[in-house]
Amino acid sequence: MERSPTFALFVLNTGMKLGLWSRHTAEPSVKGECGGGSEICFRHDDAASVDKIYADWSGRALRVLQTPVEMDFGYTFVVTDPDGHRLRVYAMSAA
């Protein structure tokens, strides 16, 4: 388990991970959209993979909430699917 005052990461026995952010500190900010405040995250090995997926997804019917950016945990972007669900793609920082 990883914790901070505004985040908790639970690693399940299957290897699946569940991350919970404070609604008030999540970036980009969480709005009361159809998909709620939840996020499905997809981990990739490197920033180049994240950029490749961003190029593909930003050309589809997905609304971009956050363009690729380096954050404290890694390189990431966020889009919403047509139903408003948040989808995050990221590569962990090497640390």
Image: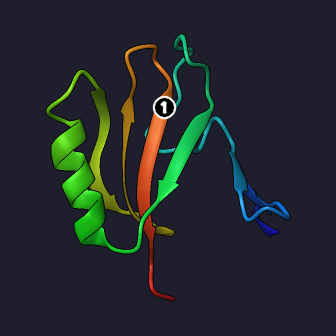
Left or right position of 91 against 46: right
Residue 35's place in the image compared with 54, above or below, is above
Left or right position of 76 against 5: left
Q: Quadrant of the N terminus?
A: bottom right
The colour scheme used to paint the residues is rainbow
Residue 14's place in the image compared with 35, above or below, is below
Q: Position of residue 30 (x, y in %)?
A: 53, 29
Residue 26's place in the image compared with 36, above or below, is below
Q: Position of residue 4 (x, y in %)?
A: 74, 64
Left or right position of 30 against 91: right
The furthest residue to the front: 14
The residue wearing badge 1 is 86
Residue 36 or residue 49, whichever sits in front: 49
Instruction: Identify the residue at image location x=48%, y=69%.
Output: 72
Q: Position of residue 85 (x, y in %)?
A: 50, 24
Query: Amino acid type of disc 1?
Result: Arg
Locate residue 3: give its quadrant. Answer: bottom right
Instruction: Identify the residue at image location x=20%, y=57%.
Output: 52
Instruction: Identify the residue at image location x=42%, y=65%.
Output: 44
Locate residue 7: give its quadrant. Answer: bottom right
Q: Position of residue 68 (x, y in %)?
A: 27, 54
Instruction: Identify the residue at image location x=22%, y=59%.
Output: 51
Residue 69 or residue 15, whichever sits in front: 15
